[in-house]
Amino acid sequence: MDHVIDETRIERRDRLRLQHSQAVARLLEEREDLYGVTGLADLVADSLRWSA
């Protein structure tokens, strides 16, 4: 039973990570003035662009 719960947590975490990354990339596309403000956000957005 614990194995099923752990997989569910992992799947949820992965889904939330993807949603967050997509939201950051979308925000930076809409608001170019934000690019360069936060290095981590820039890294996420660039990573998604290169992997698309």
Image (tube, helix red, strand yellow):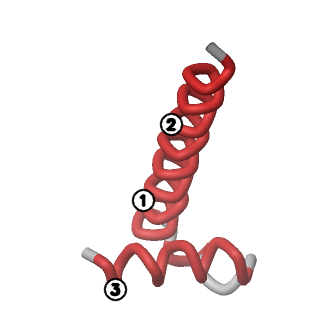
Quarter location, residue 26: bottom left
State the image coordinates of residue 23 (x, y, percent, origin top left): 49, 51
Quarter location, residue 24: bottom right
- Residue at screen point 31% across, 79% down: 51
Mark drawn on residue 26: 1
Q: CA distance from mark 3 to mark 2?
A: 24 Å
In this figure, which residue is indicated by the disc labeled 2? 11
In this figure, which residue is indicated by the disc labeled 3? 50
Q: Are marks 2 and 1 in contact (CB under 8 Å)?
A: no
Pick whichever of labels 3 and 2 is earlier in the sequence: 2
The quarter of the rendered structure image containing the N terminus is top right
State the image coordinates of residue 7 (x, y, percent, origin top left): 55, 32
Q: Are marks 1 and 3 in contact (CB under 8 Å)?
A: no
Q: CA distance from mark 2 to mark 1?
A: 22 Å
Q: Amino acid at mark 3?
A: Trp
In the image: residue 41, left or right of residue 31: right
Q: Amino acid at mark 1?
A: Arg
Q: Nearer the viewer, mark 1 or mark 3?
A: 3
Other residues around mark 1 within 10 Å, as few (<14) / some (14–19) / many (≥20): few
Count of numbered badges drawn on the protein: 3
Mark drawn on residue 12: none
Q: CA distance from mark 1 to mark 3?
A: 14 Å
